[in-house]
Image: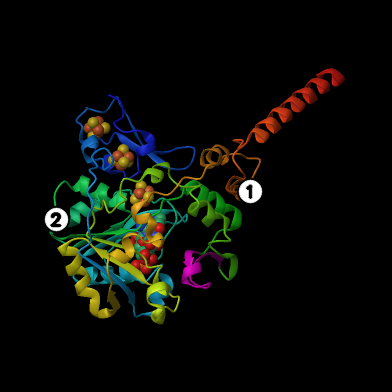
Amino acid sequence: MGWFINKDDCCGCEACVQACPKKCIEMVEDKGGFLYPQKAYDVCTDCGICEKVCPIKNNSIERHQPLKTFICRVNSATIIEKCSSGGSFYELASITIKEGGVVFGVKFDTNWEACYSYAEEIEELAVFLGSKYIAPKIGQAYKDAASYLEEGRKVLFSGLPCHVAGLKRYLHKDYYNLLTVELMCTAVPSPKVWSKYLGEVAPKGATSVTFRSKSFGWNRYGLKIMNDNDELVHEPNDENIYMQGFLQGLTVRKNCGNCLYKGFNTRGDIMIGDYWELEKYYPEINDNKGMSLVLAFTEKGCRAFDAIKLDLFVKEIPFSQVDTAVEHSCLNHSIQLHRNRECFFSKINSKRSTITRILKKCLYKQTSEPKSIKGILAIIMKSLLKDNYHRCRYLWKGK
Ligand SMILES: Cc1cc2nc3c(=O)[nH]c(=O)nc-3n(C[C@H](O)[C@H](O)[C@H](O)COP(=O)(O)OP(=O)(O)OC[C@H]3O[C@@H](n4cnc5c(N)ncnc54)[C@H](O)[C@@H]3O)c2cc1C
Ligand code: SF4
Ligand code: SF4
Ligand code: SF4
């Protein structure tokens, strides 16, 4: 039996790995550092479960209109400092834990790689705060969530839309005690590119990493990497090469260029993101510290948001303000992969250059495709001269 989806379409959700009763699928890193499932065909019994749980193979496009659209922000200055936008995730997570529930999110592991994990205490939520711009490992997250759901405990599962879709396929049925919170999502960068970059800028290791430092203001968020008191990197996203590689679609997973979960084809109860139009519509409340945009797609999502409303600054806004806004183009359109993406990934394992240099070169160099007749002639001339140079060199040196 062949593999059931094209590698380029796989979002790496690991639903197939977790569902396989024979445990004969494992995630294997490709040259670009992204994880893809690989099957041991000799152990496989051809039961078809992996195919049934795959959210890409079984995707049906359904446009969902949010029932309610809000902007909001937590009151705590400490939380707002640590989270990416307005801290909506923290409030939803805190109430879940107060009610005896479990919260799933993405944290850094000991190597500063991103992975899904869960928390049962409010103090444990801190590790989830803030976006980690790295493709996360899913591990056992769906299995663990399923066993808590079966025990009857409330579960809040927050993650990228394709991973929430993977969880839903894995679970097979609706659980009254599950709340899913999706992040608005542009794309995910390669973990290998991140670890190479971190190795270069922090050769002696790092003690803290923040992708969304608000020191330059929320709207010009930056990457900050510290080793104890040494500031190793502290640059706004428009000046940082790692962030530019991500935002310009150079270092990202291939299927993000054709994401099936755009256009509100959502599986979640709630979707959260940054409300970038604050200055445009509500300048009087813009202090450049962050504002969350919250879309509640289900009755369950509306109820969950109602429960935290009193602890937040909240304003209901019309959905039309969000739907067509360029600031939220990630809701309707996939990221355009950088023209040099393939070339970049063919170079990242080179021992002769650093990842920073490769990033710079590939981000800013033009494609080799000539744009005009003049360009074509220039390339022909160059190659003739180059051929002659090698011929002359051969004749002259005898090699
Ligand atoms: C890769 C990525 C791309 C994003 N792209 C956009 C975008 O284009 N537009 C937009 O409006 N918002 C985007 N977001 C969401 C946005 O950055 C905030 O995460 C969101 O607004 C929630 O902010 P918050 O202040 O409520 O909570 P925060 O405390 O900032 O968010 C924490 C939540 O993010 C989760 N998280 C962190 N890193 C990851 C990860 N790598 N994978 C999965 N979950 C993760 C945590 O589990 C937690 O649930 C993106 C987030 C990520 C991780
Ligand atoms: S067909 Fe069944 S046994 Fe084979 S890999 Fe898929 S889930 Fe596992
Ligand atoms: S289930 Fe997820 S990891 Fe497995 S093939 Fe489908 S998209 Fe890829
Ligand atoms: S852009 Fe789409 S495919 Fe890529 S990580 Fe986000 S939700 Fe998944």
In the rendering, at what x and y percent does residue 98 appear?
A: 22, 72
In the image, residue 243 above or below residue 387: below
**Disc 2, SS:** loop
At a point 27% along the width and 52% down the height, the residue shown is 164
Q: Determine the residue positioned at 27% across, 39% down.
A: 16
Mark 1 to mark 2 CA distance (whole Å) = 49 Å
Residue 203: x and y, percent?
A: 60, 55
Work out whether residue 332 or residue 24 is closer to the camera in this orientation and state it: 332
The residue mark sitting in front, 1 or 2, is 1
Task: Count up the numbered dots.
Answer: 2
Is residue 29 found left or right of 366 in the rendered image?
left
Identify the residue under disc 2: 175
Residue beneath label 1, please? 357
Image coordinates of residue 97 in percent, x first then y, are 23, 69
Would you say residue 3 sits in the magenta stretch?
no
Pick the front one: 302 or 331: 331
Residue at the image point whose x is 61% and y is 48% from the top = 364
- Span shown in magenta: 209-227
Answer with the quarter of the image where residue 281 lies. bottom left
Image height check: is 168 above or below 96?
above
